[in-house]
Image: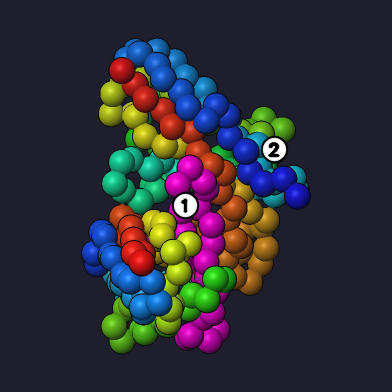
């Protein structure tokens, strides 16, 4: 069965430091890949998605992610963390396309940003 | 424009009771999904609607769970004989149905269900 692994349930960084959140998927077939962010008491918001075009994907709020097929990874990065980035981040994969897009999520990584 | 809305935002019920959770998708979105998020976990797929029909209900955990979307817009997730293990946040998402790549799903804020 397809699965998504997010290494590190909690990550803490200083404001201004690099953010790196790790995501690996298990599949021999490259899936579509997504990163979502969840702020307290809010719905999931799409940060970015990989759909087999460019391997380096830029998203909102200065985040980007790189698809590496050889490593089956899709790690999320941001060069300089802001306090407002504190939230829970979910990596997800999909093997569907078009109208049907069932998402399989990782367990999430909670990002804390301290002054 | 209005996003996906879910009501109620919180629901507390007793073991064995019946509950209904409602989802109002973004207008014009033909695809609708339900997910369940247990504490400390990522969301898990429950069911997918394309229009009025449930095209994939493989994620429903058992026959106590049922969902409908009679007019292709609002959807209701129904849980019979609730159990304490049903306690979770139930998320709804909607999307357009486009060809050539995955359509972005827009999520509602969720309904937090607590079964006592």
- Looking at the image, residue A47 sits to the left or right of residue A106; the answer is right
Identify the secondary structure beneath mark 1: loop
Q: Give the range drawn in magenta.
A: A34-59
Give the residue displayed 72% in from the left and 45% down from the top. B2
Is A91 located above or below residue B56 in the figure? below
Chain of residue at mark 2: B
Is B83 located above or below residue A67 in the figure? above
Residue B1: say if magenta: no
Does residue B78 appear in this view?
A: no
Mark 2 closeness class: few <14, some 14–19, many ≥20 residues within 10 Å: many
Q: Which residue is label 1 attached to?
A: A39
Q: Are marks 1 and 2 in contact (CB under 8 Å)?
A: no
Q: Where is residue B47 in the image (x, y as percent from the top left)?
A: 48, 42
Q: Which residue is label 2 attached to?
A: B73
Give A18 or A66, whichever is nearer the viewer: A18
Does residue B75 appear in this view?
A: yes
Q: Position of residue A49 (x, y in %)?
A: 52, 71
């Amino acid at each position: 069965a397809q699965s998504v692994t997010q290494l590190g349930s909690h990550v803490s960084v200083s404001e201004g430091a690099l953010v790196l959140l790790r995501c690996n998927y298990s599949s021999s077939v490259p899936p579509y890949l997504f990163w979502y962010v969840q702020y307290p008491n809010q719905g999931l918001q799409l940060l970015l998605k990989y759909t087999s075009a460019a391997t380096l994907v830029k998203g909102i709020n200065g985040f980007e992610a790189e698809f590496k097929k050889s490593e089956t990874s899709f790690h999320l990065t941001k060069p300089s963390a802001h306090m407002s980035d504190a939230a829970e981040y979910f990596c997800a994969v999909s093997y569907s396309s078009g109208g049907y897009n069932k998402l399989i999520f990782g367990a999430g990584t909670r990002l804390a940003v301290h002054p | 424009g209005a996003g996906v809305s879910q009501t109620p935002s919180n629901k507390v019920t007793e073991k064995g009771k019946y509950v209904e959770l409602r989802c109002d998708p973004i207008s014009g979105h033909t695809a609708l999904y339900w997910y369940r998020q247990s504490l400390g976990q990522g969301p898990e797929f429950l069911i997918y609607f394309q229009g009025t029909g449930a095209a994939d209900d493989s994620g429903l955990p058992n026959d106590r769970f049922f969902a409908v979307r009679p007019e292709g817009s609002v959807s209701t997730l129904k849980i019979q004989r609730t159990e304490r293990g049903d306690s979770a946040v139930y998320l709804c998402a909607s999307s357009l149905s486009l060809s050539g790549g995955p359509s972005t799903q827009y999520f509602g804020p969720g309904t937090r269900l607590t079964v006592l």
